[in-house]
Amino acid sequence: NKYGLNIQSSKEDGLMEVIKDTEFIQSIMTKDESLTVCRNNAPMVEFVFQLLLNNVGAVIRGKEIKEDLINDAMQIKNKYNVNDNDITGFIKACELHIESLYKKYAEAKNKSFIAVIEDRIEVLKVLCNRSDTITQICENIYKLFASESAKHVFSTIHKAKGEECKVVYLLHPELLPSPKAETEDEKQQEINLDIVARSRSLSEFIEVLKTK
C-alpha cells in the first residue's frame, strides 16, 4: 500500500478488487449486505441517495453527525439570512461560513476540528443538489443518517473501528492521508485510519476509486 505497510484483511485468502466509483452502485446492488467506509462523510451522500432511489436499503451511520448537520444548516441559514427556498444562496453561505472559520482560527496549532466542520458543510452542499429548500435538506438528513440498520451500511472509518463485514468497500481511498494532516501525530492517525479501513473485511475488500 502507499505507506509501505503489509496490511491484510481478516481473512488471508479474501478477494481484493479495485473498481471506479461509476461502477460502485452496480457492484453494491449485487451484494446481500456490505459495509462501505470512507475518510469523510460527504462522498458517501450521493451514493446512498442513488441506492435509496433504487429501493435498496442503505444508511449512513452517525446519530451525532445528524444532529450536528441540522444545527449547522439552521445556524448558517440564520447567520446569513438565507430564505428557505434560496438553495444557491445557501451554498454561498456555506462557503462563507468555512472561510470565516479558517480566518478566525488561522493561528490555531490544531485545525483538525475545522476539517470536521468542513466535511459537514460539504455534506450540506451535496444535499443541495437533491433538495429544493433548506427544510428539505433537513428532511433528507434524517432520511440518510437514520438510526435503524440497513443491508448496506456506510460509515466514516473513525466510526467503523471494531466493525467487520463479509464485503467491505473503501470509498475514495485517495482521501487518505488527509492533506490537512500536518503534525506527526496527525499523519500517524491517517496511517492508522488506512489500517482500520483495510482490516474490516472478512471475505471481500473492494477499493472504489474516484473518477477523475
Image (tube, rainbow, N blue to C red):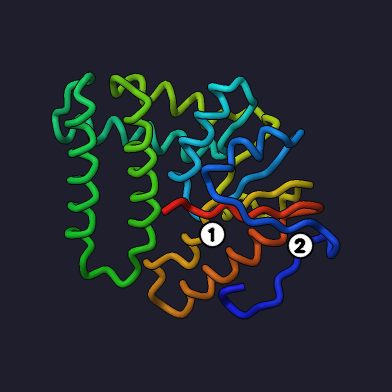
How crowded pointer 1 is (Cα within 10 Å; few <14, some 14-19, many 20+) is rated as some
Camera-nearest residue between 26 and 155:
26
Camera-nearest residue between 6 and 69:
6
Left or right: 155 in relation to 78: right
Residue 59 position in % (x across, y down): 59, 32
Left or right: 166 in relation to 114: right
Cα–Cα gap, marks 2 and 1: 16 Å
Camera-nearest residue between 159 and 208:
208
Left or right: 133 in relation to 145: left
Query: Can you say which quadrant of the picture contains the C terminus?
Result: bottom left
Residue 124 position in % (x across, y down): 35, 36
Which labelled disc corresponds to residue 173?
1
- What residue is at 35 percent from the left and 34 percent from the top? 71
- What residue is at 24 percent from the left and 50 percent from the top? 98
Quarter of the view holding residue 86: top left
**Regarding mark 1 in the picture, which secondary structure is present there?**
helix
- What residue is at 50 percent from the left and 42 percent from the top? 44
The residue wearing badge 2 is 9
